[in-house]
Amino acid sequence: MGNAEGLGGAQTAFRKLVDFLTKEGHEVGAIAIADSNEGPETHLPLLFNKRVPHSKSLFTKPIALWSAAKAAQRSVPKVFIAVGPAKSASLISKSLPRSTYKVCQDFIYGRNAADPLLRDSIEAFDAIAVQAPSMLAPLGQLNLGAIKLNWLPCFAEAPAPGFRKTRNGDQSHLRLAYFGRLAGNKGFDLLLPAFAEASFPLKVELDIWGTGPEQERLIHLIHSLGIESRVKLRGRYPDGEEGARLMCGYDALVLTSTGLEGLPLILLESMAYGIPFLATRVGAIPDCCVENPDVLIVEPDQENVRMGLQEFARRVGTGSFNSARLQQYYQAHFSIETMGARWRQFLDSPQDFFV
C-alpha cells in the first residue's frame, strides 16, 4: 500500500516495489492512495488493485477503505507493506490477521517521538523499515516500545537504456537543473539567493522542473532577486525516455533541502545517468556521498550553498567529474540489483530480518 498520486519519490517507491515483487514471482495485491487513476501498472498480474482516495468524503473514502481491507483480508497475506506511514495504512494493517507480518516503510529522517504518524505505525505494525542505514540510529534512540527496526531501500526509476549524461564540461556555459516538487523543505530560499550572489567564471543557468505549492512564491522570489534571465521555472517534467533525455542534457543537478528528507530518489536517478549533483547535508543524503568524488555535499545554509555552486562551476570547468565512475558507484550501491538483494533477504524471513 502506498501513495500513487504524482511523480514524487514516495510514489515512485510504491510503484517500483509492486513491479519488483511481481517480477520476483510473488503474489501481490496493491492498494494505491490516490484521487486519480494513477497507481501500479495495469498489466501487472495483481491479486487485486484497489484505490483509496485522499479526499475526506463522508462516504467515498470509508467505503474504499472497507473494500481495500476486505480484499487484503481475503488474500490472507504473509506480509503487508505500507510504503510510507499513513492513517489509512494503519487502519488496514490493524484489520489483518495476526499471522500477517506488517511492515511500515518510512522515508523521513529523524521523526519526533510525538509524531502522530509514527505513533500510529508503532501501534499498527510489527516493524518499521527506514529507507537508509543512517536513519536507523535516530529512530532507535526514541522510546518506541517493542517495535522492531531495520532498513529497506526504495527503488528509484530504472535508467532508460542507452541514456547517459551528454554534456561534457563546456567551459563557457554551465547548465544546472532541479527536478522535484516545489515545496518548502526543498531549500529554494537557500538556493536562489545563493545563486544570485555567486560569482561564476562562466555563464550559469538553472532550470527548475516540477510543480507544487511554492510555485507562485518562487516566481516572485526569482523576480525580486533579478535573476529571471538565468533561472527558469519549467513546469512538470516528463518521465520515461523523454525525461531521461531531458535530464541527461544538464551538467549537474542541485537539491538544497533543509529538512523532511530521507534519501531522495532523484539523486539516485542522477547518478544512474552519470550526472553529478550538489546537495545539502540533510536527512540520509550523505549516505549516497560516501567515498563518491563525483558529487558535492554542503551544509544547509546560504553561504555554503553559494560556495558550493562556485566550486561546482570550477570542477565542471576543469573536468573533475567523471560520469562513468559515477555510474559505477550507482551500480555498486543503488542499482535495482543491489537493492533487490536487500529486499530478497527480508522476504526470505521477515521476522528474522528485523531486530
Image (cartoon, rainbow, N blue to C red):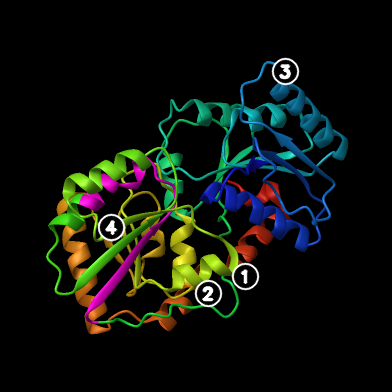
Residue lying farthest to the front in this orientation: 229
Instruction: Residue at 14%, 61% (x, y): give it.
Output: 198
**CA gap, disc 3 to disc 4?**
45 Å
Tell me where the magenta segment starts and ends, as one range: 171-192
Which is nearer the eye, 236 or 3? 236
Q: Marks 4 and 1: in contact by CB < 8 Å?
A: no
**CA gap, disc 1 to disc 2?**
8 Å
Q: Marks 2 and 1: in contact by CB < 8 Å?
A: yes
Q: Does the magenta stretch include residue 182?
A: yes
Counting residues from the start of the chain, the first of labels 2 and 3 encountered is 3
Residue where numbered disc 4 is placed: 231
Q: Where is residue 231 in the image (x, y as percent from the top left)?
A: 28, 57
Q: Is residue 33 magenta?
A: no
Mark number for residue 337?
1
Counting residues from the start of the chain, the first of labels 1 and 4 encountered is 4
Residue lying farthest to the top in this orientation: 58
Amino acid type of the residue tagged 3 in the rendering: Phe
Residue lying farthest to the right in this orientation: 74
Q: Can residue 338 be seen in this view?
A: yes
Mark number for residue 331?
2
Q: Is mark 4 on a helix, strand or loop?
A: strand
Counting residues from the start of the chain, the first of labels 3 and 1 encountered is 3
